Image (cartoon, rainbow, N blue to C red):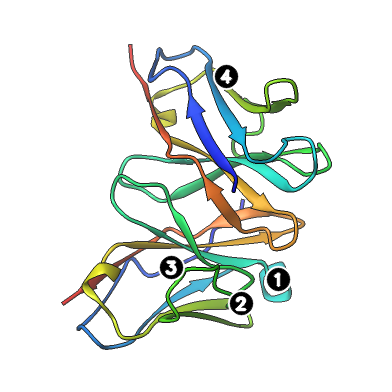
Amino acid sequence: QSVLTQPASVSGSPGQSITISCSGSTSDFGTYSYVSWYQQHPGKAPTLILYAVGNRPSGVSTRFSGSKSGNTASLTISGLQAEDETDYYCSAFTPTDSWMFGGGTKVTVL
Amino acid sequence: QVQLQESGPGLVKPSQTLSLTCTVSGDSVTDGGYHWTWIRQHPGRGLEYIGSIYHNGRPDYSPTLKSRVTISVDKSKNQMTLIVNSVTSADTAVYYCGAATVVTYSFDYWGQGTLVTVSS
């Protein structure tokens, strides 16, 4: 089963922008656009914040944006706020590997 | 609005079988709107895909768990079931059921999760 690679931690000061990367190891990852991002607060279930690379579900802050280039997808949080301090996971689906998850990134607001 | 609720025993003995149920409300498990999925999270670790029932009824399993896992749906109860055989301490985790849309393959809905501990 393929695994997506995320940095273990990313930090930034309030108001700054940070970017979390998500790299796939298979050629399929570069081809498909079924990449999604999840936010997970401690003791809670993950919640969807981006789907299909850069689309936000209704109610998700516009401070969250996504992109993808080749085998790497990225989540950018703009105007970092204290409430953004938590864990973030990327996920991707390919017909050959079904769903894959990244190892998660802990965001710290300095 | 889809709602998911996991249920099952919180403690399972090693070598025994783990069985969890996900009760779905707001949609039908057999009407093709979502791929119904089980995901787990070991304590302090990341998310791990266990398997799914695709919208067309076809099951899919993680290669690492395929030999021990069965996922099925019960239309009459609108539930999805996970069975994991021959459990070990490595199966101790929070188990989530999720609903992935058939168009974008994103998990729009999650249950609150249920902690399963494997211990004698």
Q: Are marks 2 and 1 in contact (CB under 8 Å)?
A: yes
- Chain at numbered mark 4: B
For disc 3, the neighbor class at 10 Å (few under 14, some 14 to 19, many from 20) is many
* Residue holding disc 2: A71
* Residue holding disc 1: A27
Tell me the quarter of the picture where residue B10 sits.
top left
Query: B10 or B92, which is in the foreground?
Result: B10
**Amino acid on which disc 1 is placed:** Ser
Q: Are marks 2 and 3 in contact (CB under 8 Å)?
A: no
Under circle 4, the secondary element is loop
* Residue holding disc 3: A6
Q: Give the distance between the C-alpha atoms of the residues marked 2 and 1, in whole angstroms.
A: 7 Å
Under circle 3, the secondary element is loop
Is B70 placed above or below B100 here?
above
Under circle 2, the secondary element is loop
**Amino acid on which disc 2 is placed:** Asn
Mark number displayed over residue B85: 4
For disc 4, the neighbor class at 10 Å (few under 14, some 14 to 19, many from 20) is some
The answer to whether residue B100 shows anywhere in this view is: yes
